[in-house]
Image: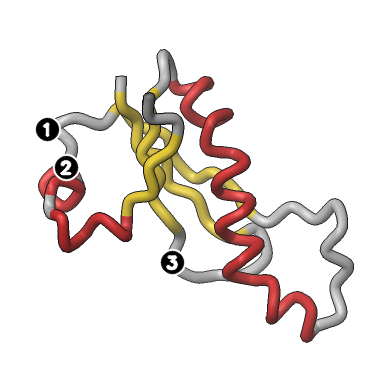
Amino acid sequence: MLYIVYAESANYCGYGQHFVVEADDEVEAEDSVAEASEEYFCEQDRDQLEEEDHDLEGMTFATTISVEPFDASHDSWKYYQDPSQAEFYIRVNFK
C-alpha cells in the first residue's frame, strides 16, 4: 500500500517535503521514511546550521507531521501523477 508522509525541518520553520512510501501500515511507512527525511533536511539545513556553529553530530534534522494512505482519492494524487511535479514527491521503499 502507498502512504504519503509529510515531514518538516526539526530546526527551522518553512515548507516541508512529501515522501511517498510503499509500506504495510502507517507505522512502517513512518519508519521507512525516517532516514530519507533526516538526510533530506540535513542537506537542506547543513550550511545554515554550520554557519550558526551547531554541532551536527547526533542532531535531529526532521520531524514527521503526517502519515496518510495515498491513492487516487487523495487530494495530492493528481500532482503525484504529473511528471512535472515528480521532484516534490520523494519515493521511498519502492520494490
| 87 sits left or right of 9 in the view | left
* Of marks 3 and 2, the one in the foreground: 2
Quarter of the image where one finds residue 24: top left
Disc 1/disc 2 C-alpha distance (Å): 5 Å
Q: Earlier in the sequence, mark 1 or mark 3?
A: 3
Q: Is residue 60 above or below residue 56?
A: above
Q: Residues within 10 Å of mark 2 (few under 14, many from 20)?
A: few
Q: How would you rate the neighbour count of disc 3 (Cα within 10 Å): few for under 14, some for 14-19, many for 20 or more?
A: few
Residues at marks 1 and 3, CA–CA distance in whole angstroms = 24 Å
Quadrant showing the N terminus: top left
Q: Amino acid at mark 1?
A: Ala
Q: Which residue is mark 1?
A: 72
Answer whether labels 1 and 2 touch (C-beta < 8 Å).
yes
Seen at 19% across and 30% down, the residue is: 71
Residue identifier under label 3: 15
Q: Which residue carries the number 2 mark?
A: 77
The x, y position of residue 53, in whole percent, is 86, 80
> From the viewer's perspective, is residue 75 above or below residue 12?
above
